Image (cartoon, rainbow, N blue to C red):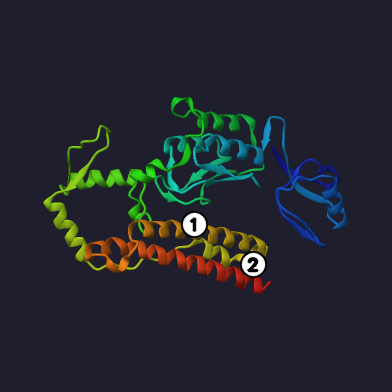
Amino acid sequence: MKFGAVPVADAEGSVAVHSIRQSGLVLKKGTLIGKVEIAALKAAGITEIVVARIEPGDVSEDEAAAEIAAAVAGEGVHVERAFTGRANLFAETAGVLVVDKDAIDRLNQVDESITFATLPAYKPVVAGEMIATVKIIPFAVAGKARDAALAVANAAPDGKAGLVVGVTDDLTKRFNAAIGYFWQATHQQIYRELTSLEEQGYIERVPSSSPSTEKRYALTSEGRDALTEWIMQPSEPGVLREDLLLKIRAGSLVPPEVLLTELHHRQALHAGRLAVYRELQERDFPDPQHLTYEQRLLYLPLLRGLMFETDNVAWCDTAIAFLQEGM
């Protein structure tokens, strides 16, 4: 792919490298330039434009992103149409996110123009939640690089494609969903901490009656003492870190529709999580007023999740209405 400034008359078939706003013309970055765009550029008094030209053997950014996303997507994953070199992957159902970290690392090492990122492994997700994204950084990628990335995705266990990222209900049953609404950790973090706790003598392995190879642990007396001491220590409140708030704070740089679309998307995600928490409440705590003290200790974290997501949904609704009033 070649970049450079060319006369507008010679730009047909190339891609605009920068967005252009002049004399009523709005030409977005990444636009494929045809006869209509050339006429509009000339009418706006523009004589030269910086473009990217796709060479033989290159694959357009949207095509490459779509193909790679389709290859890595496994069970329970929906791939949206690629746009501006990005293909987002969403959970089709509620469940637990499973990823092949080694495959992701190999894919990201194929070429600097290809990137693939996911949410943490074993994170509980809801239907419609974005779980991963494939991004082609330039406007096109060499066909060989695209093919290499597809080869990584297709080199999954048993030769099955689409096992790099997926959502499963089976793991949901094994995963302790009781803490998913207030604490999250990756599979690697959990086993790293288990190893550390075992080395410190706080936990010990116990025999398992299950035919599976899973490891089971129990607290030692030293571990129970350490846990008791930790519970008795004062806790500091968490700090709010929300990228959406930063985007809104700098939102004057983009059209209002961009932020409104994001807010509608967030509202749907929070509403989905709230629905999951309500199902858990109905299933496990249908009558909170008659719970024992020990049962109330289990219910309170879920109640915090319910109140948190209720507030998130309400804030999104307020933000959408508030911005629309000012447009």
Are there few (<14), some (14-19), or many (20+) residues within 10 Å of tag 1?
many
Q: Secondary structure at mark 2?
A: helix
| Residue 221 or residue 53, whichever sits in front | 221
123 to 263, vertically: above or below:
above
Write down the residue under mark 1: 272
Q: Residue 117: x, y in percent? A: 50, 45
Label tally:
2
Task: Give whichever of 41, 154 is nearer the camera.
Answer: 154
Residues 185 and 298: in front is 298
Amino acid type assigned to the residue bearing label 1 in the image: Gly
Q: Do the residues under discs 2 and 1 have CB atoms within 8 angstroms? A: no
Give the position of the C terminus as an image quadrant. Answer: bottom right
Precedes in sequence: disc 2 or disc 1: 2
The residue tagged with tag 1: helix, strand or loop? helix
Quarter of the image where one finds residue 289? bottom left
In the picture, the quarter occupied by the N terminus is top right
User: Amino acid type of disc 2?
Assistant: Ser
Q: Position of residue 34 (x, y in %)?
A: 82, 44
Q: Residue at 32% x, 66% y: name it.
A: 288
Residue drawn at point x = 53 percent, y = 51 percent: 128
Binning the other alpha carbons within 10 Å of mark 2 as few (below 14), some (14 to 19) or many (20 upward) gives few
Q: Residue at x 26, y 61 (%)?
A: 295
Q: Which residue is mark 2?
A: 252
Residue at mark 2 to residue at mark 1: CA–CA distance: 29 Å
User: Left of 105 or right of it: where is 27?
Assistant: right
Judged left or right of residue 88, residue 24 is: right
